[in-house]
Image (tube, rainbow, N blue to C red):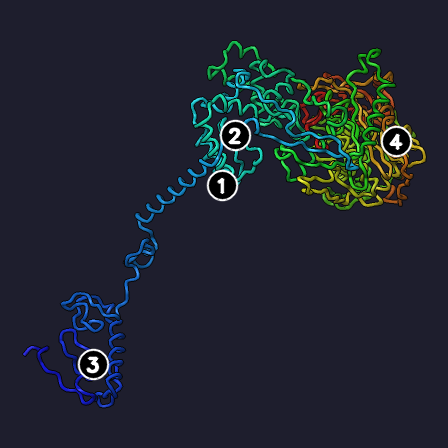
Amino acid sequence: MSEHRRKPPQPQGGGRAAARRGQTGSSSGRRAAPRSATGSPSDSYDSGGEERPFGSRAEARRAAQRSSTSGGRRRAADGAGHGGHGGGRRGGPGGPNGPGRGRGREPDPYKKRIVDYPRAGKYGWARWVPSWKLVTGTFIGFCGSLMAVAGIAYAMVGVPDVAAAAKAQNNVYYWANNKPMVSTGGETNRQNIKYEQIPEAMRYAVMSAENKKFETDKGIDPVGIGRALFNMAKGGETQGGSTITQQYVKNAMLNDQSQTVSRKFKELLVSIKVGREEPKEEVMAGYLNTAYYGRTSYGLQAAARSYFGKDATNLNASECALLAAVLKGATYYDPAGATAIDPAATQEANTKRAKDRWSWILSEMVKDGHLSATERAKYTELPKLQNPRSSSELGGQIGYLVDLAKGYVINNTDITEEQLRQGGYEIHTTFDKKKVADLEKAVKKVRKENLDVKRRPKTDTHVQFGGASVDPKDGAIVAIYGGESATKHFTNNADETGAAVGSTFKPFVLAAAMQDGKRDPDLGESQAQDERTKVSPDSFYSGKNKLKIKTYDGSIWKNDKGKEWLQTNDDDESYGAPPNYRIDLREAMRVSANSAFVQLGMDVGLDKVKQAAENAGLRESSLTGTTFPSFSIGISDPSAIRMAGSYATFATSGKQNEPFSVKEVEHEGGSVWKHKTDPKDAFTAPVADNVTDVLKTVVEEGTGTSAQLNGREVAGKTGTTDGNKSAWFVGYTPQLSTAVSMYRMDDDETKKSRPFLEMYGTGGQKTIHGASFPAEVWHDYMEQALKGEPAKNFPEAEPIGVVVNDLPTPSVTPSPTESEEEQTEPSTEPSETETTPSPSASETCGPFGTFECDDTGGTETGGTETGGTDGGVSSSPTESEDPGNTRGNGNGGIFG
């Protein structure tokens, strides 16, 4: 008989229906199986294996439901095909009715998902690897979203309006008393011209230099954009590779010059729209009318006026090529230089860069078929330029003051040159209007009373003065004299001259001797560096003319060619009584004896002298020939600002304050930057006060007597360079430190090389030295600048150091070489208090091209005060160099 036809046994209680409802049903039969056949968990708990009757029908039903639910859940996971274990009430998944429909089966968690991730049917790491369908779909969706966003953004951006582009505001500069000085720097020098007024050569010069495919491109350069984005990702520069269209758009978006991805994206969209909708003629005109050419000039017309003094329509190909070169960056390609913005942007460096690019652009124009080779051959030199300043508002000293303040802001705050060009800033300077006027008046007085170009054209032409005045308490620059007028003489003589400072450098040698001390000649080099003797100003050194210079250990110093050095004094004069010519350092400073300070520098170590000069406030870049004996007597060429600031360090008993020209910058009514005074300990108070005490002697009874002030203590030093090509006076009171320089140099600032000229006979004087015109200017200015202020005295100098070389040294029989040198005829050139002239170039043989050679004895005679560089020595002179008397060593401006 068939199994499912067999009648099951009757339950023991509860009735037949209750028993039927209480059992777990078989999937293959209509009737419930006996309790013992259901596999119910209750079976395992019955003692003796007997069935436990249910108390009621309801209880049996609930038990059956609980059993069915738990069993169904377990069996649902076993898959199909097991007909005897269906989940639920109506048969299992393997039965004749197909998949089980019992309520106990779990739903598939991966069934009918929109995104199959993590992937169904995969296990382990494979579940987390997206399928190609998912990757492709995601990429298509992303690109579609970007296109939608770009389309919306493209529709929203507009084409720039040339007339409204680059509308910069003025910057307002204030005097120290917060009264307005001048409004300038914004887009006041701009005038749009039509495309027809733009010379064809200018259009082609720009295309050859920046965008050869301009006439056919779509306004953007994908390669350039990719490069810019890559650079931005690396955190580098973002410019490079832009088309003329992109540059025009950038200029037109002056109100937003941020280097962000969103700003670049907007610029890209505008460029695309301009490239599609605007004619090329309009784009070219827009670019040239909004571009910045330097010299506060926006647009081609203003640039043509600023650089060449003519209208844009009259520019020739050479002039167009130069303006196209300037577009690369006026700070570094304007031949006039821009050291107020960057000390590296000197006239020499900028002229070379401009000439190289100018020449390249002309050649590219020939290569591109825009210029004939015949016309190109005409242009071998840069076109003649006019003075960078033409605005009457910047005449006199104002232009120099504005440049100084502008450069200080750019180099000492987070405000960029580009932001400053946009304007809207209020710049509060440290300049005292009265003191600026007093300094200019003092220079004009000396000029008027002493210089006569008509009577002495060969000696009184090309004379330049420079000056700076600094408040010692905080380093504020209260006044400068930059030249005759900023609209006539471009170079700021207070900030950059290249004129060597001569004996005004000697106080740093004395300070190093007292601060660090001289080395012991009896010790080894390493031990001598540590065990030093601090030198008193009363120490003795030789004031002998043509002194043979020695190293600290007593050996004769020799140069690279094995030549010995004999240091000369003024007029070949020896100081001190023979035969030892002993002279104390105070006296040596009073009479400005070179031999004593050159030997002192060798004993202390030129590295310590260099460090003392830097501690006082001089810049390393302005210090020249730091390994040669003449370094101690002023072959370096720091600026008047730096010299005034470094002497102020002595006035404050050794506290050094960095010179500054701007107190505060405001923008849109709020302060965005303020200067904070941060004094540094340069020297101990005893060292600084003793230097001041020695320099008081110079003014009271030495070479600086012409700088004495009524009722005030003054400390200062004169300085004149070899060849009489520059003269200085630097001095200070407790309240004010001022430096004044004088030199002669060709006024044509467009010349690549302008040598310093001798000042023999200038102003009707035999020679010009620091005690003459520079000290006179200093005196007249300081009398007025300090008028009304109470007189103050310097701190009392306490004894310091050890008196070295106190015992007379035995007489030494001079070597044949020394005897021969002393028998030579003295110089026939005129000289006066501090210096002798330089020999001609054919006579030079030393590292600075200024020392006399003696073929018989193998010695060299050092030039007085400088050893003779006159500002023309490179930062690393070599034995073979003979740079001549050119301007400076490249330290540039910004308080050089």
Q: Closer to the camera: disc 3 or disc 4?
A: 3
Quadrant where the N terminus is found in the figure: bottom left
Residue 545 shows up from this direction: no
* Label 2 CA crowd tier, 10 Å (few <14, some 14–19, many 20+): some
Residue of label 2: 160
Q: Are marks 3 and 1 in contact (CB under 8 Å)?
A: no
Residue drawn 73% across and 17% down? 746
Q: CA distance from mark 1 to mark 2?
A: 28 Å
Q: Closer to the camera: disc 3 or disc 1?
A: 3
Q: Closer to the camera: disc 1 or disc 2?
A: 2
Q: CA distance from mark 2 to mark 4?
A: 55 Å
User: Horizontally, is 389 left or right of 771 in the view?
Assistant: left
Residue 21 numbered mark, or none: 3
| Residue in front for this viewpoint, 36 or 503 | 36
Q: Amino acid at mark 4?
A: Gln
Residue drawn 84% across and 29% down? 438
Mark nearer the N terminus (1 vs 2): 2
Is residue 729 depicted above or below 522 in this figure? Answer: above
Residue 233 numbered mark, or none: 1
Mark nearer the N terminus (4 vs 1): 1
Q: CA distance from mark 4 to mark 1?
A: 58 Å
Q: CA distance from mark 2 to mark 3?
A: 87 Å
